[in-house]
Amino acid sequence: MRDVTRRSVLAAAGTAGLVLTTAGIARADGGGPGAAPAGTEPTPVGPGKGRVQLTLPAATGPWRTGTASLHLIDRSRRDPWTSPASPRELMISLWYPTSDTHGCRRAPWLSPAATGMYRRQAGHDLNTSLDNVDFPVTGAWQGAPVAASRRGHPVVLFSPGFGAMRELCTALVEDLASHGYVVVTVDHTHEASIVEFPGGRLELGRQPAKPTDDDIAAALQVRVDDTRFVLNELARVNAGVNPDAERRRLPHGLRGSLDLSRTGMFGHSLGGDTAAETMARDRRILAGADLDGSINGTVAATGLDRPFLLMSSTGHGRRNDPSWAAFWSHLRGWRLDLRLRHSGHQTYTDLSPLAQQLERALPLPPEATAALTTSIGTIDAGRAVAAERAYLRAFFDLHLRGQDNHLLSEPSPRYPDIRFMR
């Protein structure tokens, strides 16, 4: 296996905790953080209790956001990670614009049973107690109606890194939804570290801590099949069918609200690889983006004829990742390669703002602080999230909406941490 590929996959595999047990092999370089903008500081709560409330940066779009989860069962496939084999089950979340939040509650970052499990895993990784730490509440409203759109909203799918949960890029996902996209996040069951199904049932990851080439190839194939199944189910949802296994009520206005003729996809780490490989096999996806993930599938050699965006962390790119070099040379459509300065592999996830808040709020052991720096780099999380959001949205605006704000044309003084890789 290519060394940089192994680093990329293993770095994502440790995302069960806020600090990665494999963080020593993630990519990072030096640099100094600036002042933390609003939404990235931890908030003490409870007089005299010493509690800390973690937060995610607020979405920037004109729309309020709604969210709903669906439990999907693909009875045409057997789950390759279970024995005896059972039908493949997935959890997905829809994030979408809404104009009516009356009677709705804000959605937590993680569902209840998953929160307890994650708290224990993260505390173990950090070698400190997180009993006084409250995880974020998102800006999205559970079950809110979908905002009306004459044409329907463009759709973007999201796939997380190897071993990671679909919630770990909520800051990017929710921001896209606030700008009028329907974003669909997918958990790849039994590869994701934790997946909570209705009723509090938890399914944990069953992948090796140090995956081989064969393990990664198998996971990638399952992910592609998962994604194509989700695309089929979205078409049914748009036609008014409720595919939820428990027949839970879908948000009002969801039927007909998806413009599936304008579908894109992005992912982090192996999720970015998943976006590229799925595009190669399914022409329903018109544009894709890879956030710091090596290309392990056949698409590295076959390439794509549709727009694709690469965004890397410091120390990763076409010069030291042969899979990126090969993929880039076979891209026949619009393409762009960007690098985020002073970043680590996990800077593209929610672990960046959350970990920096924990560093400010808790007396972490030195080894935990060092591992966090390796994982998330030294760039201020607020600046990093703002840049990631801006370029990701500009990409999908251009290729799904035909709207060009020229951010992708040349470096911008608004985002000095983004480098155009020529």
Image (spheres, grey):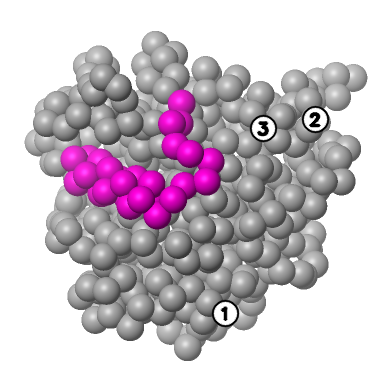
**The residue under label 1 is which amino acid type?**
Arg
* Left or right, residue 98 beside residue 56: left
For label 2, the residue is 128
Above or below 196: residue 182? below
Residue 325 image position (x, y, % from top left):
41, 79
Q: CA distance from mark 2 to mark 3?
A: 9 Å
Q: Is residue 44 visible?
A: yes
The main secondary structure of the magenta stretch is helix
Q: Residue 122, which numbered label?
A: 3
User: Neighbour class for label 3 at 10 Å: few (<14), some, many (≥20)?
Assistant: many
Give the mark toward the camera: 3 or 1.
3
**Numbered disc 3: secondary structure:** helix
For label 1, the residue is 419
User: Neighbour class for label 1 at 10 Å: few (<14), some, many (≥20)?
Assistant: some
**The residue under label 2 is which amino acid type?**
Thr
Q: Residue at x 77, y 70 (%)?
A: 31
Most foreground residue, 105 or 156: 156
